[in-house]
Structures are given as C-alpha cells and as structure tokens.
Image: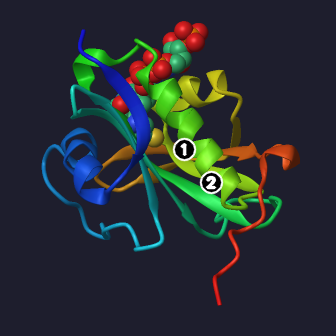
Amino acid sequence: MGERVVRLADLDEVRPLQLAVLRPDGPIPGDAPPPPEAVHVGAFEDDVAIGAATVVPAPWPGPGALPLPTWQLRSMVVRADLRRTGVGALVLRLAEDTAAGRGAAALWANARVGALGFYVRAGWTVVGEEWDKPFVGPHRWVTLTVDPDARRPPRPTLP
Ligand SMILES: CC(C)(COP(=O)(O)OP(=O)(O)OC[C@H]1O[C@@H](n2cnc3c(N)ncnc32)[C@H](O)[C@@H]1OP(=O)(O)O)[C@@H](O)C(=O)NCCC(=O)NCCS
C-alpha cells in the first residue's frame, strides 16, 4: 500500500473519480457541476484519488426542520477495489468537519439505499420515505446534526 492522505482537494482532483463511480454510463438529465462555493475532500494514495466527497451550503429538501444553516454532502465515493477498508469513513469525517468548520449546523444527503448502512455506522439518521431518483434508483435522505462545539464562526473578511 502506498502513502495515503485525506485532505481538502480541488474539483479537478476529485471529479473524475466521482463521475466514474456515480455516473459510469455518463451524465443523466438534471446533472450539474458543483457550484463554486462547494468544498471538496479527497483521499489519495500516492497522489491518485481513491475516495472523495463534496459539501456545499444547500437548503434541506426533506420533511421537518433541521438546524440552520444546512449543508449538503454530495458525491461520496470510494474506488471500488478499496471499499470496506475505512477510506470512506475518513473522507466522510473530514467532509463533516469541513462543513462544521464553515458554520454548518446540520448536514443532509440523498443516500442510495445500498449505502444507508455506511451513513448509519457514521452516526447519521435515515429520514423520510424511500424515493426514486430517475436513472439511478431508490434513495432515502440522511441527516447529521453538527455538534455546536465543532462549529466555528465564518472567517472574517479582510477590509
Ligand atoms: C458508500 C461508500 C462510499 C462507503 O465507503 P467505504 O470506504 O467502503 O466505507 P468504509 O470502509 O469506511 O466503511 C465504514 C463503515 O461503514 C460500513 N459500511 C460501508 N459500506 C457499507 C454499506 N454499503 N452498507 C452497510 N455498511 C457499510 C463498513 O462496514 C464500516 O463499518 P465498521 O466501522 O463497523 O467496520 C462506498 O461503498 C462507495 O463508494 N459506494 C459506491 C458509491 C455510493 O453508493 N456512494 C454513496 C452515494 S449516496
């Protein structure tokens, strides 16, 4: 095994892996690139991306209320041959901490039903009924309320 690191990353470093895992047959209607304010996390082995996730401020679309502001976790992936080795948990943790450090009070994600156990293992809560995402399959929402102690005020803007 080469040297592994988990760190913030540029879109270009993580997007190819995210698309290869989540869109093996190419884009689907409604796909859009992440907005500029999105923050990306990557796991790298010898500088090759092996895991990734993206967090971005986004309103909660599900039932009930979450503490505000809410951030969405998107495009959580691990390269297929390295799954169940702990990479995803490390990426998810840094993604959570990154959103919390930027002021998120809660995170949410559209979770594929096959991945629900991963989120539950990480302390997330499954919310609402199952729903179908066209061209992808059945999903549930998952949420995580951020520990207030983990939140930091937004970095002040320099005059
Ligand atoms: C979901 C995914 C990111 C998990 O990454 P991973 O690196 O395999 O996860 P880890 O090895 O860090 O697993 C962490 C824990 O979650 C558990 N876990 C992982 N995937 C799971 C799953 N699909 N179902 C149930 N539990 C799961 C592991 O057993 C482990 O538990 P442990 O701490 O008791 O050992 C990865 O399987 C993946 O990329 N899947 C395809 C893309 C996808 O579906 N992404 C999610 C979109 S919502």
| Total marks in image | 2
Residue wearing tag 2? 99
Pointer 1 local density, CA inside 10 Å: few below 14, some 14–19, many at least 20 = many
Q: Residue at x 28, y 47 (%)?
A: 14
Observer-nearest residue: 88 or 41? 41
Relative to the observer, which residue lies in front, 136 or 31?
31
Q: Is residue 33 above or below residue 12?
A: below
Q: Residue furthest front?
A: 159
**Residue at 86% across / 49% down in the picture?**
148
Q: Quadrant of the N terminus?
A: top left
Residue position marked by numbered label 1 in the rendering: 95
**In which quadrant of the rendered view does residue 150 lie?**
top right
| Res 31 quadrant in image | bottom left
Res 60 quadrant in image = bottom right
Of all residues shown, which one is farthest toward the bottom?
159
Looking at the rendered structure, the kind of residue marked 2 is Ala
Q: Secondary structure at mark 2?
A: helix
The numbered disc on residue 50 is: none
Name the side, left or right, on which 66 lies relative to 132. Answer: right
**Horizontal side, residue 141 vs residue 149: left or right:** left
Is the residue under label 2 in contact with that under label 1 (CB below 8 Å)? yes
Question: In percent of the image, x 69 and y 51: which residue is there?
Answer: 100
